[in-house]
């Protein structure tokens, strides 16, 4: 059976970034301890969930990864994160060397914190570096400077972490190609093992959206963002990074194992307010507000807020849409047939041929994947499978 990915949502932040529309909250320090207790109770209760019967009749279904996302997971103490890790290990069969990631904000951690985090079993860190430019960081509402990123990486290496990821954002209002090059050139000497590069999206309900709507800052320029994406591909490729997913680069062998579960359309369980889960045939999600979540857990009520069934046709299409994001791996014919009980070329022969004729898809003997041209028109390709 397919192993599970475990996502644990930490919905707290010290401040709200101008572009963020995630399910996060500030000023809730009094909820940290009761939240951790509730989170651990939800994890342990999942061991009795009927959803798990799909995967295994064993007492502890197999899981492969743990990912603490947010919010700012590093706002909690290492011991609190360790409690949640132990709850996962009690409930799921996790290998001793399972990838366990914690998202961190530079400037919120130090060597002592990181050593304690390492002792709790965390072996991968993901830093929201975002930019090396002070003006861009101010626009984004980030509290750190790039000096904090440098200090965080130095402390992480000293604490024994050998798997560090950066998030960087490009396509910002007023951002020049040279400024983006400087950010890349500032990041590379730190030798991150993995980098996630995201084009800025202006989401409704965020301060940034209000500023753009009022004309205080311009809308991001998609043509400039495309040039920045091109530049990143060149710069990171020359530095030896593998462009393994549309928005992700890594050193050889350092792809994010947790995110590969999503891209391969494999099952995952999400814990915490607003977290989503998928058991292949069904998707469900939790209540969003932390106080409601804690109260429901305390009353031993379900925290599920909504759900949808996934029919086989939809699941097959999602395997293609997600898998084609993997630029080297793509979607293998064997994996598709094993997962869905039908040959990919029988199910999607017309779409595959059309993509190949347009130069958007490469059909290899064992897999289908995007061409270089297809990477820039990926949405056009993927909609044909939905």
Image (tube, helix red, strand yellow):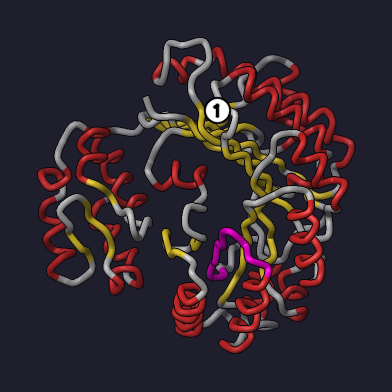
Q: Is residue 142 visible?
A: no
**Left or right: where 194 falls relative to 15:** left
Residue 133, placed above or below residue 54: below
Figure check: 29 above or below 94 = below
Which quadrant of the view contains residue 265? top left
Asked whether, in this view, residue 268 is left or right of residue 143, the answer is left
Between 213 and 171, the one lying in front of the other is 171
Q: Examine the structure image and report whether residue 198 is included in the region drawn in magenta.
A: yes
- Which residue appears at 48% of the width and 63% of the height? 247
In the image, is residue 2 above or below residue 41? below
User: Which residue does the image show at 28% across and 63% down from the upper left?
Assistant: 370
Residue 242 vertical position relative to residue 139 in the rendered view, above or below: above
Where on the picture, by quarter, is residue 167? bottom right
Taking depth in this image into account, of 143 and 16 the one nearest to the observer is 143
The residue lying at 85 percent from left, 42 percent from top is 28
List x then y, in percent, for residue 146. 77, 72
**Is 123 colored magenta in this rendering?**
no
Please give the name of the residue rendered at 80% of the width and 47% of the height, measured from the top-left corner.
Answer: 114
Residue named by callout 1: 95
Residue 29, position in %: x, y? 88, 41
Residue 41 shown left or right of residue 80 in the figure: left
Q: Position of residue 95 (x, y in %)?
A: 55, 28
Tag 1: Cα neighbours inside 10 Å, few (<14), some, or many (≥20)? Answer: few
Where is residue 353? Give x, y as percent. Answer: 11, 60
Q: Nearer the viewer, residue 340 or 290?
A: 340
At numbered mark 1, what does the secondary structure look like: helix, strand or loop? loop
Which part of the image, by quadrant, shows the N terminus? top left
Start-end of magenta stretch: 190-200
């Amino acid at each position: 059976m397919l192993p599970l990915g475990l996502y644990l949502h930490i919905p707290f932040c010290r401040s709200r970034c101008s572009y963020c529309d995630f399910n996060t909250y500030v000023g809730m320090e009094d909820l940290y301890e009761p939240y951790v207790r509730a989170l651990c109770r939800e994890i342990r209760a999942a061991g009795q969930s009927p959803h798990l019967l799909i995967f295994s009749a064993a007492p502890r279904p197999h899981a492969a990864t743990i990912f603490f996302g947010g919010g700012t997971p590093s706002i909690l103490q290492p011991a609190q994160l360790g409690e949640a890790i132990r709850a996962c290990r009690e409930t799921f069969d996790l290998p001793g060397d399972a990838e366990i990631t914690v998202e961190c904000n530079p400037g919120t951690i130090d060597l002592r914190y990181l050593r304690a985090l390492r002792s709790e079993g965390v072996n991968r860190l993901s830093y929201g570096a975002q930019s090396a430019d002070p003006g861009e960081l101010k626009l984004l509402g980030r509290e750190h400077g790039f000096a904090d990123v440098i200090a965080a990486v130095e402390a992480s290496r000293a604490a024994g972490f050998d798997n560090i990821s950066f998030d960087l954002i490009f396509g910002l209002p007023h951002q020049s190609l040279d400024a983006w090059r400087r950010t890349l050139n500032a990041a590379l000497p730190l030798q991150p093992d993995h980098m996630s590069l995201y084009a800025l999206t202006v989401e409704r309900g965020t301060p940034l959206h209000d500023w753009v709507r009022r004309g205080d800052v311009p809308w991001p320029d998609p043509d400039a963002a495309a040039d920045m994406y091109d530049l990143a591909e060149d710069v990171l490729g020359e530095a030896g990074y593998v462009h393994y997913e549309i928005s992700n680069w890594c050193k050889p062998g350092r792809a994010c194992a947790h995110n590969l579960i999503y891209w391969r359309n494999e099952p995952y369980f999400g814990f915490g307010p607003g977290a989503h889960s998928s058991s292949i045939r069904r998707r469900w999600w939790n209540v969003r507000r932390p106080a409601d979540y804690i109260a429901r857990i305390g009353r031993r009520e379900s925290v599920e807020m909504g759900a949808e069934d996934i029919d086989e046709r939809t699941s097959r299409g999602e395997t293609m849409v997600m898998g084609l994001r993997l630029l080297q791996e793509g979607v293998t014919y064997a994996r598709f047939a094993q997962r869905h009980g039908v040959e990919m070329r029988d199910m999607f022969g017309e779409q595959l041929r059309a993509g190949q004729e347009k130069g958007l898809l490469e059909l290899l003997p064992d897999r289908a994947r995007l061409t270089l041209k297809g990477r820039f028109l990926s949405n056009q390709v993927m909609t044909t499978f939905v």
